[in-house]
Amino acid sequence: MTTYIIQRLFIFFPMLLVISFLVYSGLELSPGDAVSHMISPELASTITAEQLDAMREAYGLNQSFLTRYWIWLTSMVQGDMGYSMAGGVAISEIMVKTVPATLELSMVALFFSTILGCSLGVISALKRGSGTDNSLTVAGMAGVSIPEFFFGLVAILLFAIELKWLPVGGRLLPHYETLWDRIPNIVLPSLVLALMMTAGAMRYARSSMLDVLAREFITTARSKGMPEWRVNILHGFRVALTPVVVLIGFRLPLLIGGSTIIEQVYQWPGIGSMFIRSVRASDYPLVMTISLMYVFVVLTASLIIDVLTALIDPRVRLGKE
Amino acid sequence: MKKLYVVIVAVLAHLMFISSASAQPTNSNQLSDPRVRQALCMAIDMKTIGETLFEDQIIMADSLLPNGPMKSPNLPDYSYNPEKARQLLAEANWDSNRELDMVFYYGDQLTADFMAAIQAYFADVGVKMSYRLLQGDVGAQLNSVPDDGVNGPAAVDYDLGYGARAAIAMQEYYNTFKTGLNPQTPGDPKMDALIEKINSSADPEVLKPAFFEIQEYQMEKVNICPLYYQKLFIYESNKVDRNGGAYGNAQYNYNWGITDWNVSGGTLQTNTGPVEFFEQPWYNLGLWIHNKVVFDRLLVADGALQPVGCSACESYDLAADGLSLTFKLKEGLTFHDGDDVTVEDVAWSIRTAMKAPQMHALIGNTVGSIKGADAFKDGSTDDVSGIKYNIADRVITLELTKIDPNILTTFTQFAILPKHLLGDVDPLKFQQSDFWQMPIGSGAFKITEVKMNDFAKFEPFDGYHGGKAGFDIIAYPSYDGDGNLIKNAAAGKMDYGFTKNVADVAALDAMDNMGTKAVDIPYTRMMWIMQYPKP
């Protein structure tokens, strides 16, 4: 396994490099630049071409594409993420403010969705063909089919506007001093996000559990006179957990990039909403840093999943024929 | 009999305008034929569009200039008349196979629907049109001017453009039609002369005949097709009582008496808070809440943005020839950090505005009119000869090279910024200074807490010369319009703001806790018509 991990690490950084170049090229091909975003169409009619050139020079935008990419890359390698073009804020500062907000939201959602998804999936499998199973299956289908922004808006309408139980959005207010103060604000976005994730986990857990329950070792366990709960949980569920763990592993990148829509709906000041704004503003240092972070998380999660799969299922042998 | 004579003369005058349609195209582009341009204007039923798409919340436009004292009473009538439009197109031998390319830069659904409606109206008179949303470097695609400002060829690739002109000074509507400055309209010596005339005095009464003349001339030539005047809607929750404070053009700064407002609960919630930084206040003059409350100006305007007196100044004097303006600052003014506001801060602010690129045209015109501005801008001098001040006397005098008719209006909008905190900043990267993470001004409210992209809190400033407000302000972030307005208002999280979105207005008016007030603003939506020959 060590050899496998080392091999993966060897291709890890070239992949980061290639993807960063592709993202940078994509930004270059997209119309406009940061300066054209800063100057509104109405103002542009009153500003001279020389003034625009001076601005582009001040931001280094008049250099060639490869030069700009090289400058960005070498700075990044040295740990300097640069500055947002729109407001001159250090990107490291932006990340420090936005990443924890996103992690806070996503981790709560992942926690609830994992617990709920696995529990409901197992119940559904154990009660196969019953009304409970059918209801949960329909709910699961609805959960994966209905867009999360729709769930988000319905939840706002119901719980924030009609019942006024919870805030309509946002994360912090001036009088918030402790984590406890913030809990009302995280309830709706995290539960809506969790609901979407629960549906997938539940369907995975159900089919995995059904698959395991049909195996011979379950029959053997029952024939030994083991209590049913022990057969189902200790023998069945433990084995059924493997694909569910893989699914959860695949969701680790979602901790960073999966809550963008919910952040928009709930005015949550996370990395997802910042990414959308930076793309619209052609703020390429910020876009590049956030993209690279997404790629890094995806590649890392992929590596972790492989290793975890091997640890959970002894039949998997990484790096061997 | 006299009345009948007047009517006959008016009808004849009107017919003369229409008869000007017998003019010929001036180049290979058929859109250079005024008959075609008139036909395009007459093909659009703005009244019906206004009543349906815009929910009766717009005002029909008959010229570039908004309604008001400067509006000419003798403008030609280009209202909906499809028969006349077809006739004019036939006279002009319009090529019915030609498909006009219309561009626009608003990404909302209402604009897309409006474009579809115009397309249908054009089709009804036999004109094909397709439309597209400009993306990327919109300014360059829209506003590139030809090297030859009279003969072209065009430096833009569209035929028609849908856009707006929001002006605080009436001259802004026409100054861009000067030869060499306009991307769609070829230069014209008469137009240039009329532009000179409307910029020749600071006295509105003197300028009125010139404005009449330029409007009539432009509408006779149909250089643009005026579509409608946009209204602005101020919304407030039932927690807010302005206590007699005026309503006005909320996109700018005016005397709204905020220090006298009563806000139940002691906190006014609003939008236009910062996302990543506070935008510097010389660009979108009153768009963001911090522009309005954190910074002070030398003069103050009324709701119609007419200068009405001093704010930070104790007195001011505009010379009779309009070529020098002197301010004396009030005594004892301080910034929120306790440092004195001096005329040196005013002088430094003006000098910096000469070089900073993101600048409102009104301010740009004024600071560019000051003696020595050009030499300072190009770096050949370190100081501006036309700015003279004495800190001890609190007096600053600005000497101009030419009359700026809107100089007083400029100083109702121009925020005084602290030199001691911004003096070392490169003007080209003015917005990138750390200062804009938590700016300090000398206005009625100071910023006390900022969680970027969450909220900004403003508290009343004890040292403000205009009194102390009795409430705090919390501003939530918004970006490119407030997409969260309706749900925040419905949830009681919005007490004040303004919008131009008629769909938002309908939703806000339906809420028990909210109300809206329409304000006429100088904001003209129009169709540009590209008259240069194609390359």
Image (tube, grey):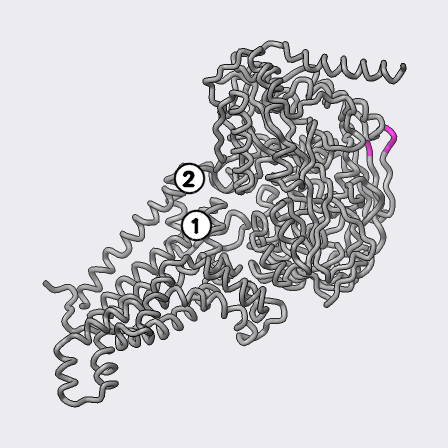
The amino acid beneath tag 2 is Ser
Mark 1 touching mark 2, by CB under 8 A?
Answer: no
Q: Quadrant of the C terminus of chain A?
A: bottom left
Residue at point 37% right, 57% down? A294
Which residue does the image show at 48% across and 55% down from the upper left?
A273
| Residue count near mark 1 (Cα–Cα under 10 Å), binned few <14, some 14–19, many ≥20 | many
Q: Position of residue A137 (x, y in %)?
A: 32, 67
Residue A95, compared with residue B429, is above or below; it is below
Q: Which residue is mark 2?
A: A30
In the displayed orientation, state which residue is furthest to the right.
B1
Question: Residue A117 at x, y = what percent?
Answer: 34, 71
Label 2, secondary structure: give it: loop
Q: Residue at 76% across / 37% down in the picture?
A: B387
The answer to whether residue B384 is seen in the rendering is no
**Disc 1 designates what residue?**
A287
- The chain holding disc 1 is A
Q: Position of residue A302 (x, y in %)?
A: 27, 62
Choose between A70 and B137: the one closer to the eye: B137
Q: Which residues are magenta?
A: B319-324
Distance CA(mark 1)–CA(mark 2):
13 Å
